[in-house]
Structure formats: C-alpha cells, structure tokens
C-alpha cells in the first residue's frame, strides 16, 4: 500500500471502511467497463490518502471520505492526477477556496502544474449513504465534468450558465479550471 505525501486535515471521527469496501464504492463512479482496472485511492486507519489498488487503465477512482456526511466518490482520467494531487496537497496545508484556486492558476500558467492537453472527464457519484451489504449507493446521483483548461465561451460555443436542466455549460472559462458541467436533473 503506497501512502501519498499528504494527510487528510480532518480529525478522524468515523471508522475507516475496509480496503475492499472502499474499493467497491469508489469504482462505482467510473464507467462500468473501466472499473476492474482502475487505480483506487482511499484512506488508511489514520486518514491518510493511500493507494488501495494499482491501476492498469487510464482511470483513477477516489473512495468516499468517511468523515464527510453522505456518500461521494469520483473517478477521473489519469491526465487529471497532477491537478487533483496538487489540490489535496494544498488542502492538507490548510489552503482552500479562492486561495487554492489562485495558487493552482498561477502554477498552471507558469507550467509548474501540468494540466491535461486534451479534454479529461471527472465522474461524480453521490448519495445519502453506501450499503455495505448490497455494495450499492443509496439515492445515487451522477454528474459529469469535462476539464478543458483555459477554454472559453468563444472557443467552445457553450453558455456560461445552464439555460435548462441538464444542459451543458462552461464553468470557470478562461482559467486552468475551465470545465464543462453536465448536471442531469435529479431523479424525483
């Protein structure tokens, strides 16, 4: 098990699910055909982000943080790993919000932070909880983000805000974090 170079900055108030449970939940965010070979990051007993399973394809899955309410897991293309890792490092240093955005923006513009050169997708799966008995998410909801660093409304033809439920739009246009938001309507 590889321990990454940063620690969760949250106090450990919940027990950490087993490696197997974390992997089972984390991979649900990935496209089905990519789950079995995806790299999986999760948490050790001390709350450190660790590699739970090495991957052999281009997907990285991150297990639910047991210290946050509800269930939330993501999977993303490995091209996003430098961006994601840097975010975790800065949060571990106590940097978040606009300061985190500004730091990564400056690092991306200077070339210190490598950003994807092609569109890269982040899959987000949330729910109220995860059933360890059935290995399913309770009240699941998917949304998608396609990172296209420094893209703009003009370069994509996308609006800067959604005009209808589920319509794709570009968020943070012109920045390192420019991305297409695809947020389907929630099931009723």
Image (cartoon, helix red, strand yellow):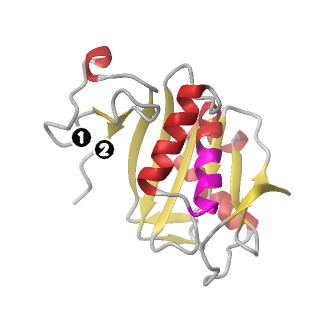
Q: Secondary structure at mark 2?
A: loop
Query: Considering only vertical position in the picture, is 162 above or below 91?
Result: above
| Residue 36 horizontal side relative to residue 183, left or right | right
Residue 18, horizontal then vertical, whole percent: 73, 71
Assess disc 1: are there few (<14), some (14-19) or many (≥20) residues with their C-alpha within 10 Å of its C-alpha. Answer: some
Can residue 94 be seen here? The reply is yes
Q: Residue at the spot x=38%, y=65% of the render?
A: 139
Q: Which residue is mark 2?
A: 183
Query: Considering only vertical position in the picture, is 27 above or below 114?
Result: below
Residue 186's image quarter? Answer: bottom left
> Is residue 95 within the magenta segment?
no
Residue 167, horizontal then vertical, whole percent: 22, 35
Q: Are marks 1 and 2 in contact (CB under 8 Å)?
A: yes
Residue 98, horizontal then vertical, whole percent: 41, 51
Q: Quadrant of the N terminus?
A: bottom right
Q: How many marks?
A: 2
> Is residue 93 within the magenta segment?
yes
Towards the viewer: 13 or 140: 13
Q: Secondary structure at mark 1?
A: loop
Towards the viewer: 133 or 121: 121
* 3D distance between C-alphas at marks 1 and 2: 5 Å
Query: Considering only vertical position in the picture, is 26 above or below 78?
Result: below
Write down the region rendered in magenta.
84-94
Q: Quadrant of the C terminus?
A: bottom left
Residue 31's image quarter? Answer: top right
Q: Residue at the spot x=47%, y=43% of the render?
A: 102
Q: Residue at the spot x=43%, y=32% of the render?
A: 146
Can residue 25 be seen here? The reply is no
Towards the viewer: 16 or 138: 16
Assess disc 2: are there few (<14), some (14-19) or many (≥20) residues with their C-alpha within 10 Å of its C-alpha. Answer: some
Q: Which residue is mark 1?
A: 166
């Amino acid at each position: 098990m590889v321990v990454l170079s940063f620690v969760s900055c949250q106090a450990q108030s919940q027990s950490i699910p087993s490696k197997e449970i974390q992997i089972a939940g984390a991979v649900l965010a990935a496209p089905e055909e990519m789950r079995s070979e995806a790299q999986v990051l999760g948490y050790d007993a001390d709350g450190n982000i660790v590699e739970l399973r090495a991957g052999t394809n281009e997907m990285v899955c991150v297990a639910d943080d047991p210290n946050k309410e509800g269930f939330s897991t993501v999977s993303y293309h490995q091209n996003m790993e430098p961006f994601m890792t840097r975010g975790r490092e800065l949060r571990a240093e106590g940097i978040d919000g606009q300061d985190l955005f500004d730091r990564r923006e400056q690092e991306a513009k200077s070339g210190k932070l490598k950003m994807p050169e092609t569109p890269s997708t982040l899959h987000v799966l949330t729910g109220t909880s995860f059933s360890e008995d059935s290995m399913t998410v309770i009240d699941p909801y998917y949304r998608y983000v396609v990172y296209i660093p420094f893209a703009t409304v003009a370069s994509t033809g996308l609006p800067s805000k959604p005009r209808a439920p589920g319509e794709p739009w570009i968020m943070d246009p012109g920045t390192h974090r420019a991305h297409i938001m695809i947020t389907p309507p929630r099931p009723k």
